[in-house]
Image (tube, helix red, strand yellow):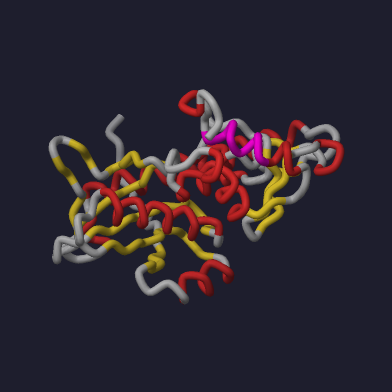
């Protein structure tokens, strides 16, 4: 074990491994090396979350993990490399921008993120009060004043943590617009955390709620019995305002 390991963060440990490797490395290899150097210090799910959150070319990482440094390049299939702008190009909030980002695209990205965040926040607010509309008997988890809304874990923040009518746990992840296959690892990490640290023998399953789902996500979820997809529909209502 390295000296003063208590002072090392997960991000620093990952950067250490990638710097020494100086090549594309799988998440499994990163975790193996970190566990050898810092035994029993971090959970695997926490390291996976940091690999995702520290990647410069993952747009959701900027909203889901805004405080994490962005120094990795994600090659997909859980393979990572230290980010090199000369090799990988320049990126702005997870999007390729070329040598110099255009003002129009930067504004478009910022607007999309604000709209997405607003929709997710409104959806979260509605469902936190009306979980029964999502599934009969579903209710927000609460214990000793701790709410299941924006439930903090070692691997990230769960949008909604609920209990079903049987008293089993349901991890709910909300996505405004199109949900991609990247969300699968995120939700599975949350589910595993709840199973190991909170559920106390109760069952744990997951729900991804979004406006639409890409094909790879549908195929992936089809192989995971305890993870389901639910599509939300927006209904506009209007009322007169007295003037």
Horizontally, is 149 left or right of 8 in the view?
left
The region drawn magenta spans: 10-17
- Regarding residue 122, the answer to whether it shows in the image is yes
Residue 234 locus on image (x, y percent): 40, 57
Q: Determine which quarter of the picture holds residue 229.
A: bottom left
Q: Is residue 85 above or below residue 210?
A: above
Q: Residue at x 61, y 44 (%)?
A: 59
Between 174 and 33, which is closer to the camera in this rendering? 33
Q: Determine which quarter of the picture holds residue 166.
A: bottom left
Between 146 and 109, which is closer to the camera in this rendering? 146
Magenta run includes residue 14: yes
Horizontally, is 61 left or right of 91 in the view?
left
Q: Is residue 207 above or below residue 87?
A: below
Q: Residue at x 42, y 58 (%)?
A: 188
Q: Determine which quarter of the picture holds residue 84.
A: top right
Horizontally, is 143 left or right of 157 in the view?
left
Quadrant housing the C terminus = top left
Between 171 and 72, which is closer to the camera in this rendering? 72
Magenta stretch: helix, strand or loop mostly: helix
Residue 85 locus on image (x, y percent): 81, 36
Residue 165 locus on image (x, y percent): 14, 64
Magenta run includes residue 80: no
Q: Residue at x 57, y 46 (%)?
A: 52
Q: Residue at x 58, y 42 (%)?
A: 112
């Amino acid at each position: 074990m390295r000296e003063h390991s208590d002072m090392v963060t997960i991000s620093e440990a990952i950067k250490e491994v990638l710097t020494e490797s100086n090549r594309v490395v799988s998440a499994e290899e990163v975790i193996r090396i970190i566990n050898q150097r810092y035994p029993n210090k971090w959970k695997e799910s926490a390291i996976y979350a940091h690999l995702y959150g520290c990647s410069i070319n993952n747009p959701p990482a900027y909203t889901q993990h805004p405080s994490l440094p962005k120094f990795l390049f994600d090659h997909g299939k859980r393979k990572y490399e230290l980010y090199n702008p000369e090799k990988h190009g320049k990126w702005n909030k997870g999007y390729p921008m070329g040598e110099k980002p255009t003002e129009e695209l930067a504004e478009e990205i910022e607007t999309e993120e604000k709209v997405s965040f607003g929709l997710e926040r409104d959806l979260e607010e509605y469902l936190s009060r009306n979980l029964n509309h999502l599934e009969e008997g579903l209710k927000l988890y609460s214990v000793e004043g701790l709410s299941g809304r924006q439930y903090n874990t070692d691997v990230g923040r769960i949008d909604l943590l609920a209990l079903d009518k049987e008293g089993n746990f349901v991890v709910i992840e909300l996505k405004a617009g199109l949900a991609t296959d990247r969300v699968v690892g995120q939700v599975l990490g949350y589910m595993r955390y709840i199973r190991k640290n909170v559920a106390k023998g109760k069952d744990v399953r997951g729900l991804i709620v979004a406006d639409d789902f890409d094909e790879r996500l549908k195929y992936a979820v089809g192989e995971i019995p305890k993870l389901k997809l639910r599509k939300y529909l927006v209904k506009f209502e209007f009322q007169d305002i007295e003037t």
